[in-house]
Amino acid sequence: QDCAQAARLVKEGSELGDGSPAEETLYVKATQVCRQMFEAHFDLGLFYLRQRQFAKAETSLKEALAIKREARVLVGLGNLEAEKGNL
């Protein structure tokens, strides 16, 4: 795993931050290059949440949570449920 490369990809995606397919590609590639990188899964989940791709958002956020239990992931999952109208 090349987690240094994945970190660069996540940084590029965050800097892009425009909701484009290019941003998505950077995050997806980061998750493939370093499967245990929390930030890659978390940022991809937030990307999908902003795009209203709820199933993909839930998968990515849960993958992030499996790597590291952080409150911001739980907040993201709560926001997801609110967006889906479940709260």
Image (tube, rainbow, N blue to C red):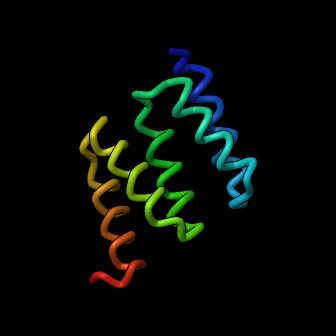
Above or below, 52 relative to 37: below
In this rendering, position of residue 60 left or right of residue 33: left
Q: Quadrant of residue 74?
A: bottom left
Could you say where residue 11 lies in the image, as x and y percent from the top left? 63, 38
User: Going 69% across and 49% down the picture, which residue do you hit?
Assistant: 23
Taking 60 as reference, is 34 above or below it? above
| Residue 76 place in picture, x, y as percent | 37, 62
Residue for point 46% across, 42% down: 41
On the rendered structure, is 78 left or right of 16?
left
Quarter of the image for residue 68 reads top left
- Expressed as whole percent of the image width and height from the top left, the position of residue 54 reads 46, 66
Q: Nearer the viewer, residue 76 or 31?
A: 31
> In the shown orientation, is residue 29 left or right of residue 77?
right
Give the quarter of the image for residue 48.
Answer: bottom right
Identified at 50% across, 15% down, the residue is: 1
From this view, report whether residue 85 is shown above or below residue 60: below
Residue found 55% across the figure and 16% down from its top = 2
